[in-house]
Amino acid sequence: AQSVTQPDIHITVSEGASLELRCNYSYGATPYLFWYVQSPGQGLQLLLKYFSGDTLVQGIKGFEAEFKRSQSSFNLRKPSVHWSDAAEYFCAVGANAGNNRKLIWGLGTSLAVNP
Amino acid sequence: DGGITQSPKYLFRKEGQNVTLSCEQNLNHDAMYWYRQDPGQGLRLIYYSQIVNDFQKGDIAEGYSVSREKKESFPLTVTSAQKNPTAFYLCASSGTGGIKKNIQYFGAGTRLSVL
């Protein structure tokens, strides 16, 4: 069955420290991959996406993610975290074929940033 | 500005009452989605529609109904059959063609509570 796992429910980092949020997926082929961010009480905003090509993708707000096919992973990274990065982060995968546009979502990782 | 508008931001339901959540988009997107979000459970798909006058059940459709009479609008009705409606509801839409049809964009959400 297709699934997305975000192993870390909650992460706390200090401001200025580096960040890596993990995402592993189970899918029959190479999927489309997404990271979204959600501030409290708000909708989700797309941070970055991977469709094909270069496995290191750049997103907004200084985030990047790397697709590793051998590890079925799409981890999100940021070299230096800002207090405003505190939010909930969701990884999602989509079908890379046909007309199915549904996304499969991870349960999210809550990020807290210490000053 | 193009985007997705959800209204109201907060909604209260009395027992036995049906309530309708509004979702309007001016992005000219074909597909629209409704998600329910509960703490620690990520996003769960309620209904989705890929074209006007057509929609499909998602993973948790029981107690909900939708319509898609116009491309821009995808209202969600929470019926009295939904015994635990308290949650944050998110509407999304996805693009018109090619790879971009897989990117979902979100509204700001409606928080529904039971009186």
Image (spheres, coloured by chain):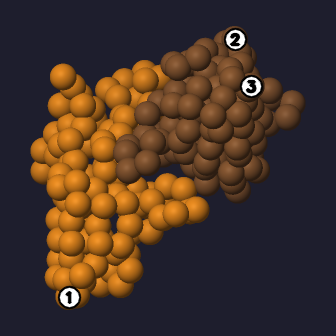
Chain colours: A brown, B orange
Residue A102 is situated, as x and y percent measured from the top left of the image, at 48, 45
Residue sitting at x 74%, y 49%: A8
Specify the farthest residue to the front. Answer: A115
Q: Which residue type carries mark 2?
A: Asp
Q: Residues within 10 Å of mark 2 (few under 14, many from 20)?
A: few
How many numbered discs, if any?
Answer: 3
Secondary element at tag 2: loop
- Per the model, the C-alpha gap separating discs 2 and 1 is 53 Å
> Which of the numbered marks, if any, corresponds to residue B38?
none
A107 left or right of B87 in image: right
Specify the farthest residue to the bottom. Answer: B16
Q: Which residue type carries mark 1?
A: Gly
State which quarter of the image contains the N terminus of chain A: bottom right
Q: Is residue B44 above or below residue B1?
A: below
Residue B11 showing in the rendered view: yes
* Callout 2–callout 1 Cβ contact below 8 Å: no
A101 left or right of A53 in image: left
- Per the model, the C-alpha gap separating discs 3 and 1 is 50 Å
Foreground residue, A19 or A83?
Answer: A83
Q: Is residue A109 above or below residue A21?
A: below
Q: Nearer the viewer, mark 2 or mark 1?
A: 1
Residue that numbered label 1 is attached to? B16
Q: Nearer the viewer, mark 2 or mark 3?
A: 3
* Quadrant hosting residue A17: top right
* Callout 2–callout 3 Cβ contact below 8 Å: no
Q: Quick check: do tags 2 and 3 share a chain?
A: yes
Residue that numbered label 2 is attached to? A54
Q: Which residue type carries mark 3?
A: Ser
